[in-house]
Amino acid sequence: MEGAVGEAAAVAAVAVVEPLSDEQRALWRCIRNHVFDDPSAALRFSRRLARDNHWSQGFADRVIDEYRRFVFLAMVAGHPVTPSDQVDQAWHLHLLYTRDYWGAFTGCLPRPLHHGPTLGGGAEGRKFADWYSKTLHSYWRLFGEHPPIDVWPPAVERFGRDVRWLRVNGGDYWLIPRPERLWRRIVRLLKRPPNGDT
């Protein structure tokens, strides 16, 4: 958490909030007002996003709001942008709703928004880490606030912990979280001298 606060403070220290142009405000209104949930669907977009990622409905709704912000940044930041893993999950799901994505949604954008995954390798990793850092900087510059850390983690987490996700069928496997604190406590107990002295 300390690294995240430090990274956010560094972004705020060098970023100047820019006022949006009339064109940018109109674009943001169009993106912000887009309705992802089809009211006639038994399984709506936001519910599917929550279900597929084992998120609460509230968190999925927040990720969708941040996905909107990411799309806006992709259009106006002036540099390539990279989403957080959470935002990327919303983008991946939206791409499956092709009629909506390539219809009403991208219809209000000034240009198409294609998804370009990594080609792999160290250079690509450094490129996307740089783009992510610039995305966080532009978030502050254009929205005048820090991105929520639970949706936009610091780059070290985004390209460390967040790249280890995998798809698992919950019907075939039990998912048990790693009890990191418990293991550290057990190790401390095992290192204790046999007479109980500490």
Image (spheres, rainbow, N blue to C red):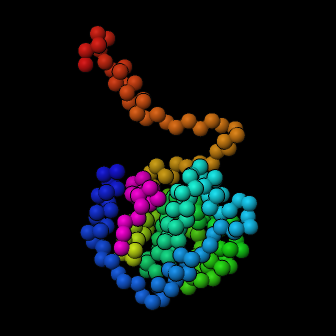
Q: Nearer the viewer, residue 32 or 104?
A: 32
In the displayed image of the protein, which residue is found farthest to the top? 195
Q: Is residue 61 left or right of residue 171?
A: left
Q: Residue 180's x, y, as percent?
A: 43, 35
Q: Is residue 119 visible?
A: no
| Rendered residue at 50%/66% (across/down) | 66
| Rendered residue at 55%/62% (across/down) | 61
Secondary structure mostly seen in the magenta stretch: loop
In the displayed image of the protein, which residue is found farthest to the front? 39
Quadrant for the C terminus, please: top left
Q: Is residue 151 visible?
A: yes
**The magenta stretch spans residue 177:** no
Q: Quadrant of residue 96?
A: bottom right
Q: Quadrant of residue 195?
A: top left
Query: What segment is highlighted magenta in the picture?
Result: 144-158
Q: Residue 56's x, y, as percent?
A: 56, 52
Residue 170, above or below 37: above
Q: Nearer the viewer, residue 34 or 8?
A: 34
Q: Residue 47's x, y, as percent?
A: 64, 58
Residue 61, above or below 14: above
Q: Is residue 84 left or right of residue 190?
A: right
